Image (cartoon, rainbow, N blue to C red):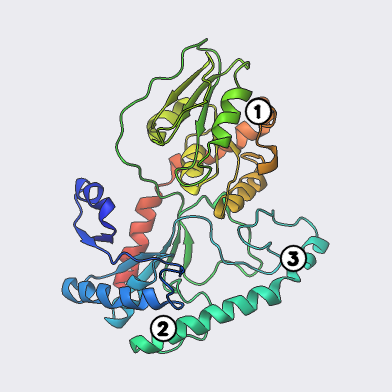
Amino acid sequence: MVETWTRWQEDIEREGMRFAPAPEYHVFPTQERPLKPYEAVRRAASVTRELVRAERPDVVVSDILTLAPALAAELEGVPWATLIPHVDPRGAPGFPVYSIGARLPRTAVGRRLWGAFDPLLARGLELGRSELNETRARLGLPPLDHVHGGISRALALVGTFPQLEYPRPDGPEPGTHIVGPLQWEPPFGDVALPDGDPSWPVVLVAPSTAQDLEGRMLRAALAGLADLPVRVLASTNKRGETGGLTVPPNARLVDWVSYSRTMPHCDVVVCHAGHGTLMRALTSGCTVVACPAAGDMNENAARLDWSGAGIRLPRRLISPRGLRLAVQRALADDRLRARSRELAAWAAAHDPADRAAELVEQLHAL
């Protein structure tokens, strides 16, 4: 059974699973909804607890951003696991601050410089632990003596490439397993590749569905790649508004594209580095040009750059010339292509979903 928002009901039932509506609420307080920290989570946990009580599942698996099911499971004495559907956000000594887009330092001096932020980060984590423990007390649960209390210590599934995870000085976090990319997409048909010389490489421009609403990256890519010997397939992601967009002869602009069907035919993917798009591109053996827009896209782009499987293009350089140069380098650099194909080979030799299911079954058997 999958408990989530009603917008996903049709997709869940199409996959042959049962659907349960999750409490829908604003995660962060606003002027109109001035909720105290974790107040919405406490309300949602009470609702989800009734579902757990009625279904009596063997295991509850909840997303890292969805704390209510974990609390509900604990209240009902059911084992729970956490799914981290991106790189592990937990830091370690010498790690840069998560999501700001900084790479792992290469020297002892760099590690010491980032270590200067550790006390500040520690205070933030302690504040989070205090607020979570207040919520736990209201629900009748005992306090936790460790931070990151929303991540299960029994089992945390990290759904990313192990090649994108920074090595931790003290080894993996307790109960954490990097299983590989866990991928799904809504069904969609094939999209024809652009016309042009079939010997020309194919570049897919895959914007975020949530960021860059003005289409800065899309416009820059169409303009910058217009005169290159490449075939460009670009998507608007169903935003509909294409006013002012000039589509050159070597490009095709569509409203939507299936990444799983299209990326295996591409050489380069230009994207905002959302984790799902990045995983699909690397699984398909594409070299990635990452143009991070916000949030964890910065972290994903930094990990991509660190791993050697693609190029990170800072926001200030997202222009026709900047994208043209980045794509040219992605096509010319044999090391980038070889590394992206290494990751694709790893994905072909492993089944992340099967490994994740195996670990969940082991958790139930404990």
Residue at x 34% of width, y 64% of height? 360
Residue 108, given in percent of the width and then of the height, sits at 81, 63
- Mark 3 and mark 2: span between their CA atoms? 32 Å
Question: Mark 3 — residue?
Answer: 114
Please state which of the two labelled residues, at mark 3 or mark 2, is closer to the viewer: 2
Query: Which one is nearer the viewer's eye here, 309 or 302?
Result: 302
Secondary structure of residue under mark 2: helix
Residue 199, given in percent of the width and then of the height, sits at 54, 12
Q: Earlier in the sequence, mark 1 or mark 2?
A: 2
- Looking at the image, do the residues carrying marks 3 and 2 touch, with CB atoms under 8 Å apart? no
Mark 3: amino acid: Trp
Question: Mark 1 — residue?
Answer: 320
Q: Quick one: label 2, few (<14), some, or many (20+) residues within 10 Å?
A: some
Question: Mark 2 — residue?
Answer: 135
- Mark 1 and mark 2: span between their CA atoms? 50 Å
Q: Earlier in the sequence, mark 3 or mark 2?
A: 3
Tell me, yes or no, if residue 314 can be seen here. Answer: no
- In the picture, measured across the screen, residue 66 lies left or right of residue 147, that is left
